[in-house]
């Protein structure tokens, strides 16, 4: 018999979101009349915008003709015109089209990236953080074993991001020559790294031989013009950082699947070889490129009309987030001592229920309010006692959930 890859044996039991879905199903089965509203998983709900739909429809119709049919792209890195538009519309030409690798989403890139670094690489993650950073590292053999305690994996450095440090980590705990996972706006906390934060991060990475894996999947939600949307707004970042971006949340492509990864030509391995060449080899070997139809939609999303439509959708979700925050600042939550964190630049509201276990709060909110949320403990040790509330939802459902939450008590 063939043995299972031992790295998979080291994974912690269960992945956060399937566990949430399991508990929801069990509650619904026991309470069939309950109308459950989800403020949990960050899945978009609003329709694709007309301009994007038209572009994708036209592309599909053209695919039904001899002249308009397209098969594999010459390069798995994506349609040249889309790479050029990302270069100009997002990075004002400071990132070359050849440094842009179009993909089927930021999560997919994050999962594949570890293949370039192998099991011996040291890893540091924000804590709390999106689970794929840790699980992807463990699957690649870079995480070590999961101890019996709740302090995480043996070989991963957890960088606590808490109210006490404004949700940006103390980099002094990071070892030399590490991969550093940073997400801004952060999932789950909603915090956005300042220009000063990122300048210190880049300076540290360059001084200590580290590579930053910068997850900017929520960058379109940043409304404060003083806050950087890309790591490449910081001088020197092209020497030490890879950036992941996504159409999922701003364009509603969670089911369409489209994103991109920037791997600068300046970025080198210890032996002097270019990281972008290794990434190109991975994408051309294990990936045939993102759907041409999705890429047609992404190309339209980044023109003037597409950007205006996306910004309207983003404002809608941010308005939802403001409603959720208001509900969490109601008298009953104040009496419980709940602390609420949300700066208006992300689709998530992060709340601390001091002295409570996250999964206990999850269960009680589901029981009392029939509302699904996300327990912070699922994002890492420092997420304990916190709950993430997602603003992705139809307005009427968000309003109904907020009314229910106003009567919650624990």
Image (cartoon, rainbow, N blue to C red):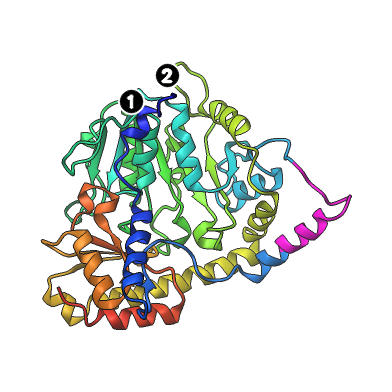
Residue found 26% across the figure and 62% down from its top:
387
Query: Looking at the image, which residue is at 14% across and 73% down?
Result: 410
| Residue 395 seen | yes
As drawn, 177 above or below 409: above
Q: Camera-side residue: 308 or 217? A: 217
- The residue closer to the viewer here, 119 or 188, is 119
The answer to which of 181 and 98 lies nearer the viewer is 181
Q: Residue at label 2?
A: 270
Q: Which residue has dot 1 on it?
A: 177
Would residue 69 be counted in the magenta stretch?
yes
Task: Look at the picture and state if 362 lies above or below 147.
Answer: below
Task: Give the Cα separation between the discs numbered 2 and 1.
Answer: 9 Å
Q: Earlier in the sequence, mark 2 or mark 1?
A: 1
Kindly identify the residue that appears in the image at 24 percent across and 40 percent down: 158
> Which element type, helix, strand or loop, lies under badge 1?
loop
Q: Residue 93, located in which quarter of the rendered image?
A: top right
> Residue placed at 64% from the left, 45% from the top?
83
* Residue 272 image position (x, y, % from top left): 48, 18
Image check: 410 left or right of 325? left
Q: Give the range drawn in magenta.
A: 55-71
Toward the right, the furthest residue is 66
Q: Residues within 10 Å of mark 1 (few under 14, many from 20)?
A: some
**Crowd around label 2: few <14 · some 14–19 · many ≥20 (10 Å):** few
Q: Are marks 2 and 1 in contact (CB under 8 Å)?
A: yes
The relative height of residue 269 versus residue 154 in the rendered view (above or below) is above
Relative placement, left or right, of 69 versus 273 is right
Q: Please provide percent x and percent y for residue 197.
A: 30, 47
Return the mark for residue 131: none
Q: Residue furthest top?
A: 271
Q: Is mark 2 on a helix, strand or loop?
A: loop
């Amino acid at each position: 018999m063939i043995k299972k890859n031992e790295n998979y044996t080291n994974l912690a039991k269960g992945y956060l979101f399937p566990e949430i879905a399991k508990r929801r199903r069990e509650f619904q089965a026991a309470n069939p009349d309950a109308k459950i509203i989800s403020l949990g998983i960050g899945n978009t709900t609003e329709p694709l915008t007309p301009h994007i739909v038209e572009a994708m429809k036209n592309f599909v119709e053209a695919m039904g003709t001899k002249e308009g049919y397209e098969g594999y792209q010459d390069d798995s890195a994506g349609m040249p015109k889309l790479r050029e538009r990302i270069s100009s519309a997002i990075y004002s030409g400071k990132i070359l089209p050849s440094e842009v690798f179009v993909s089927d989403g930021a999560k997919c890139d994050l999962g594949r990236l570890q293949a370039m670094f192998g099991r011996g690489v040291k890893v540091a993650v924000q804590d709390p953080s999106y689970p794929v950073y840790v699980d992807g590292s463990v699957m690649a053999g870079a995480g070590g074993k999961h101890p019996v305690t709740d302090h995480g994996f043996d070989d991963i450095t957890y960088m606590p991001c808490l109210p006490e440090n404004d949700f940006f980590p103390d980099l002094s705990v990071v070892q030399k020559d590490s991969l550093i996972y940073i997400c801004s706006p952060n999932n789950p906390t909603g915090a956005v790294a300042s220009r000063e934060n990122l300048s210190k991060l880049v300076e540290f990475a360059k001084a200590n031989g580290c590579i930053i894996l910068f997850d900017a999947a929520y960058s379109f939600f940043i409304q404060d013009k003083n806050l950087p949307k890309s790591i490449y707004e910081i001088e020197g970042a092209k020497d030490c950082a890879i950036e992941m971006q996504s159409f999922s949340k701003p364009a509603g492509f969670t089911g369409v699947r489209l994103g991109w990864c920037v791997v600068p030509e300046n970025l080198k391995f210890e032996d002097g070889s270019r990281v972008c060449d290794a990434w190109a080899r991975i994408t051309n070997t294990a990936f045939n490129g993102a759907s041409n139809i999705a890429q047609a939609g992404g190309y339209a999303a980044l023109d003037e009309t597409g950007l205006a439509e996306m910004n309207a959708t983003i404002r809608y979700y941010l308005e939802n987030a403001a409603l959720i925050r208001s509900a969490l600042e109601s008298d009953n939550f104040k009496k419980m001592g709940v602390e609420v964190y949300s700066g208006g630049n992300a689709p998530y509201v992060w709340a601390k229920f001091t002295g409570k276990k996250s999964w206990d709060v999850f269960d009680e909110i589901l029981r009392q309010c029939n509302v699904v949320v996300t327990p912070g403990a699922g994002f890492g040790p420092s997420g304990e006692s916190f709950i993430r509330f997602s603003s992705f939802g139809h307005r009427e459902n968000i309003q109904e959930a907020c009314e229910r939450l106003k009567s919650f008590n624990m």
